[in-house]
Image: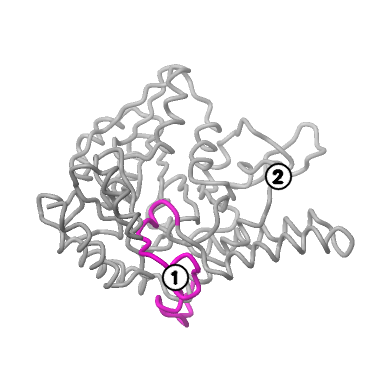
Amino acid sequence: MSENVTMTPTELRTDIPALQDGVYLNYGAHGPSPRYVVDAADEFVRTHEYESPIADDPYETAFEAFDRTRETVASFIGAEPDEIALTESTTAGINAIANAIDWQPGDVVVRTDLEHPAGILPWQRLEREGVEVRVVETEAGRIDIEQFAEAVSDARLACFSALTWTHGTQLPVSELVDIAHDAGALALVDAVQVPGQLPMDVGEWGADAVAAAGHKWLLGLWGGGFLYVDRVVAEGLEPRAVGYRSVEDANADPYEYAAGARRLEVGSANPAPHVALGEAIAAISEVGISNIEDRIYRLAGRLADGVPDDRLCSPSTPESGLVTIDVADPTATVERLAAAGIIVRELPSPDAIRASVHAVNTAAEVDQLLEALDEEW
């Protein structure tokens, strides 16, 4: 999407009610929305329920909203609208792919040990059907290319994160995709930590499918997820869940799946979160993703510089706004910081706390966190 930079990060911050009190540093889990993102969803619901039943057609109103969001998302991530399925979440997107492949006993799925449960649980379910799941072990958020290549050599699919939620490290997506493709495997990327904080171009990655959502760094609402699927790959997918949005003609017998990624959509869903997603993408684009990226790096670097080297689980030169810090008692530390109005989160692995620094944060907030952490070391 071309960016018309007309807003600063500070101006965006003033539009987010949740940021007016306290220090919020948890965008890797949830990004509080600006007023106009919430207003866009609210306005759509009111129009859909109050006006369209008589003045229009509620289904046409909903489908037009879906189409607009597909176009917005596609432009934002370097895809075409027919390569975008609108989902509830990243988890829903990964499951949509997992459930649209005709798995056979002995098929192999490869993932890393850095994956979020969204990239673990769908494959655990398939293990019950005889699918083998191989886990590539990593170190400090880094993947060994040779180990990955060996694991994927006879795999049917590889699933990995573009940006790790555990360490904030960037995995070499295009290189991993190429290795998977050379082995004849599909490549599915969990990219939920990318949109809204770093540039994202699925064409450069070359992956077969990319799952993400808008409720983190994009500052959208829960329920506004999206899934990119390469149009050629989509033609070979046969989803287990099928509804009138999945097919070309719901009354045809036999039915034909819709062309492209839309076959992975099912039936009636509330378009409001996806209307909000379009509004959120517009706001991020007004600030400019390159401006956001630069500011995130500066603020995350300020945080990393203030943490002792032996306590920093993320790179000393951050690769994202996710900074993971080793403390003696993560649960107690998160609770103590929350009592002081500083919001971070605890991680299960590594056993640490994670601060997520967005462009709407300030240097003063980073310093507040560092001052509050002084007693930890």
- Taking 151 as reference, is 54 above or below it? below
Q: Is residue 172 left or right of residue 59?
A: left
- Residue 164 in the image, given as x and y percentages of width and height: 31, 48
Q: Which residue is mark 2?
A: 245
Disc marking residue 35: none
Query: Dot 2: few (<14), some (14–19), or many (≥20) neighbours within 10 Å?
Result: some
Q: Quadrant of residue 250?
A: top right
Q: Is residue 23 magenta?
A: yes
User: Which kind of residue does numbered mark 1 sit on?
Assistant: Gln
Q: Which residues are magenta?
A: 1-30
Disc marking residue 20: 1
**Residue that appears at 53% across and 45% down:** 232
- Residue 35 in the image, given as x and y percentages of width and height: 56, 69
**Residue that appears at 32% across and 59% down:** 340
**Residue that appears at 40% across and 70% down:** 289
**Residue that appears at 40% across and 75% down:** 9
- Residue 123 in the image, given as x and y percentages of width and height: 43, 28
Chief secondary structure of the magenta portion: loop
Q: Is residue 332 left or right of residue 104?
A: left
- Taking 121 as reference, is 92 above or below it? below
- Taking 333 as reference, is 364 above or below it? below
* Label 2 element class: loop
For marks 1 and 2, give the one nearer the viewer. 1
User: Which kind of residue does numbered mark 2 sit on?
Assistant: Arg
N-terminal of the pair, mark 1 or mark 2, is 1
Q: For the view shown, which residue lies furthest in the bottom direction?
A: 6
